[in-house]
Image: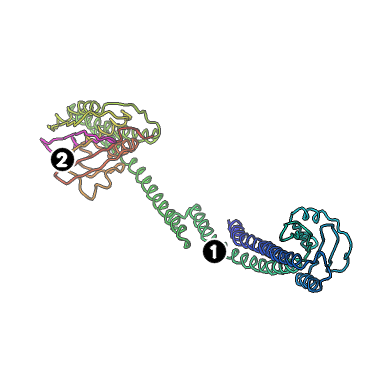
Amino acid sequence: MRVHVLIALFLIGIVPILFFGWEMINTYDRKATDQRKNEILNQCSSLSNLLVSQGYLTDPTISEINTELNRMAGIYDGRIIVVDSKLNILKDTFGIEDGNILISENVIKCLSGTTNISESKQDNYVELTIPITHNNTKEIIGVILMSFSNKNIHLISTMLYQKATILFITTAILILVFAFFYSGVFTKPFINLKKAIGHLTEGYMDDEVKVNGFHEIDQISNSLNQMLLRMKNLEKSRQEFVSNVSHELKTPLTSVKVLADSLLMQENVPSELYREFLVDIAEEIERENKIINDLLSLVKLDKTASEMNITSISINELLELVLKRLRPIAKKNNIELIFESFRPVIAEVDEVKLTLALSNLIENAIKYNVEDGWVRVSLNADHKYFYVKVADSGIGIPEDAQDFIFDRFYRVDKARSRGTGGTGLGLSITKNAIHMHKGAIKVYSKENEGTTFTVRVPINYIA
């Protein structure tokens, strides 16, 4: 990662400097050359008017004109040749071609009215051919051919290239040094984070990940610590679960063994005592069976969390069926069972799992109630969810226990739970089933005033 950061920082710093430096120097070279061309074109145009007005094409011996031509050629470090319409060279500031005939494609085109500019970058000169036009008749009566050197411009460009190269190399070194150290600072927190994670994987679960660095690194560190805390809690819950399972399964067996040993140790035991002991043994076996069934229900829910058998059913009919099954228990305990349905509700649910969840809630409301109490089950819905509320007039749940009632094997009153046949798994099964429907369950309770569970489930199943 450090290499990638180093390369990225280096390129980000160098490429713009290289591009802009190269572009600025080329722009200067181009603009300076164009400016020189335009300047000379203007000078040649003025010179052309002067030649016509002084009649130089008919009398090339005018000293003032020759002096001006030599002066202009010297200023621009160039050469000026004046040619008449018959291609005769009237003036050559180099004094080489005076009186000769100049046969040139550019000159011939210029006599036709075409101004031409050609540039030789290899030899560093520019050649211009400008027509000499009579002021009155607008007839082309000659040509001015001027060549000038742009060597000075290229020398300045070369000097700028050299200075830019030195500046570029210096800047590149500085950026490389900065990128090297900054990439080390940037990647150091990640290296420390990797070491901390490696420390955790070696089994040091009690340690916290402490990595100082950027804000994002702090967030990652906090997230890892939260995950570590959750893993510790899960491990603690797993150990407690195993311990509770062992205890809950062992207790009925211990009771059965004690009862059986008591019978075996006595002689001539009356049949009534045998019957009493066998009834107790049967109850303990039934209790063991209930614990095993609830454990199997939990395991089944965990294993089939992604296997939902979704069908569209009437929630009203489902609740009526559940209440019908539980009415004998309510009647036996003299509990009034009330069902309130505010509207018909058709929803996409797993009928078996939802029935299990609602049955546990209503059965708990019946079991943990007071004498001559009541249980009220209500059903309502909106455009998105349906709501099932199970309220009772029971003994209530202490406030400090309400955060734990959905934990496996948790029982508020263990003595009372055993008396009613509870295993501490019912609400855990209910919560799992509701969550598998992407729903939610809440509880409101006060001691000796009753408890209300509210279940919210989407009408349309969300996969």
**Quadrant in the picture for the N terminus:** bottom right
Judge from the rendering whether residue 107 lies leftward or rightward of residue 348; answer left or right. right
Give the Cα separation between the discs numbered 1 and 2: 63 Å
Judge from the rendering whether residue 409 lies leftward or rightward of residue 16; answer left or right. left
Q: Which one is nearer the viewer's eye here, 260 or 442?
A: 442
Residue 378 location, quadrant: top left
- Residue 261 visible in rendering: no
The residue singled out by tag 2 in the image is: 394
Residue at left 78%, top 62%? 144
Residue 373 in the magenta stretch? The answer is yes
Residue at left 78%, top 53%? 109
| Position of residue 147 measured from the top left corner of the image (x, y, whole percent) | 79, 64
The residue singled out by tag 1 in the image is: 185
Q: Earlier in the sequence, mark 1 or mark 2?
A: 1
> Magenta region: which residues?
364-387
Q: Which one is nearer the viewer's eye here, 243 or 457?
A: 457
